[in-house]
Amino acid sequence: MSTQVRSQVVTRAIALASLAVPLAALAQSPAYRAQMEAGSGTRNVGGPYDGNNVSNDTFAAVISRSTVAESGGPVVSQGSSAGTAQTGPGRIAFFGSSSGSTSAFRAPSFGNGWTSGYAALSDNFTLLAPGCAACTGALGVMTFSVQFDGRASAGGTATGDLVGNATGIAGGSWEGSSEWRSFVNVQAPAAWFAPLPAFVDAAATGRYHDGTNVASPGYSSTGLAVGIYTFEMAVRFGSSVFLQWQAYMGTSSSGNSSGNEANLAAQSASELSSAVSWAGITGLRLLDGTPVAAYTALNPNGIDYGQSFVAAPPVPEPPSAALALAGTVAVLGLARRRLVRPGSPAPATRG
């Protein structure tokens, strides 16, 4: 059942991402979309499901929460999850946490929580240099930076007393996973025939599973680790530069037990925060190397893309279900044995 939870989160994340506008579809007006889902459940009680979706031309932010508890007879189980997704000019950010816990006396039990989120932005800005007569309609070179952030974790414990079993296998098990992915695309269609790249494609990902760095936090399938990167690309003064960004995340946690062992308990918690941010324009020059010191880079709403949109990451909240189970285990006296199971990128430099 815990394997189903893990695959459920990945499947939902992919489904959310499939709703995205293709990167090649360049929007003329800014648009921001955020979607977050949270769910939970236990063996006999299906937990609440909370899904939110916001899309507008200024800012998008959603939050989803879900908690369910089951207590009675030989089984005590709980699942909990919470997540937020935010997107606006030059930035996409997520925070998500989930936990699942269970304890039982000679009975199968299961508790889980999961979150899944998707966000996207479509924006554009126009480079103008009013004091530069030679710049009007000319090709130039823009130097800009993008910052990838990501932290992910998963962990848990399991305990069990054995009845008529000499193999030493505990009766409880846990499973946790957290994952984030970010994709950015920046294009200047009016500069396709310049000698320098007229677009950049970049992506960064990170994943934890069962407390193990399956891919180190911030590992990238395209070679970019967490950090700030500087790119150069060709642009044309007076023409638009387009941004098409997408990102998604997911967490999953479950506690699970089966068989006829006497005393069982398991708990797990997963958590992540991630963001991708425009870090500002750091240089602008004509193709012949002449620097352009005074310029504007405004989107249709007057937002200045010459500046950085990097912000401090959110402060994590403690997973509530994992904390709640600690009291449950103490009351039932179950902790006698412990088991722990574990496109074409443009030239870039990392800052």
Image (cartoon, rainbow, N blue to C red):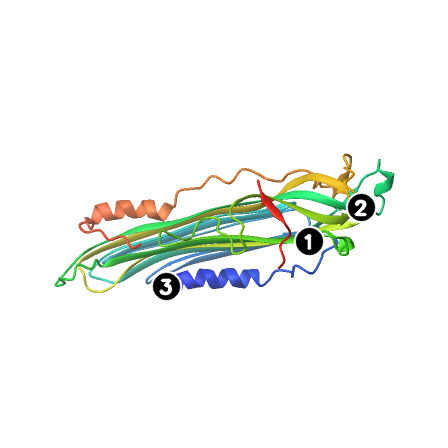
Q: Label 2: which residue?
A: 237
Residue toward you, 282 or 152: 282
Quarter of the figure that contains the N terminus: bottom left
Amino acid bearing label 3:
Thr
Compared across the picture, whether 96 is left or right of 59 comes to left
Viewer-closest of 137 and 104: 137
| Contact? badges 3 and 2 (CB < 8 Å) | no
In the structure shown, which secondary structural element does the residue marked by tag 3 occupy? helix
Question: Residue type at mark 1?
Answer: Phe
* Residue 162, placed above or below residue 272: below
Q: Position of residue 7 (x, y in %)?
A: 42, 63
Q: Earlier in the sequence, mark 2 or mark 1?
A: 1
Where residue 323 sits, quadrant-wise, is top left
Q: Which residue is mark 1?
A: 199
Q: CA distance from mark 3 to mark 2?
A: 53 Å
Residue 183 in view: no
In this rendering, position of residue 90 left or right of residue 239 = left
In this picture, residue 25 sits left or right of residue 135: left
Helix or strand or loop: what does disc 1 sit on?
strand
Q: Residues within 10 Å of mark 2 (few under 14, many from 20)?
A: many
Q: Is residue 8 left or right of residue 290?
A: left
Question: Which callout, 3 or 1, points at the residue further toward the start of the chain?
Answer: 3
| Quadrant of image for the C terminus | top right
| Residue assigned mark 3 | 3
Tell me the number on the disc at residue 217.
none
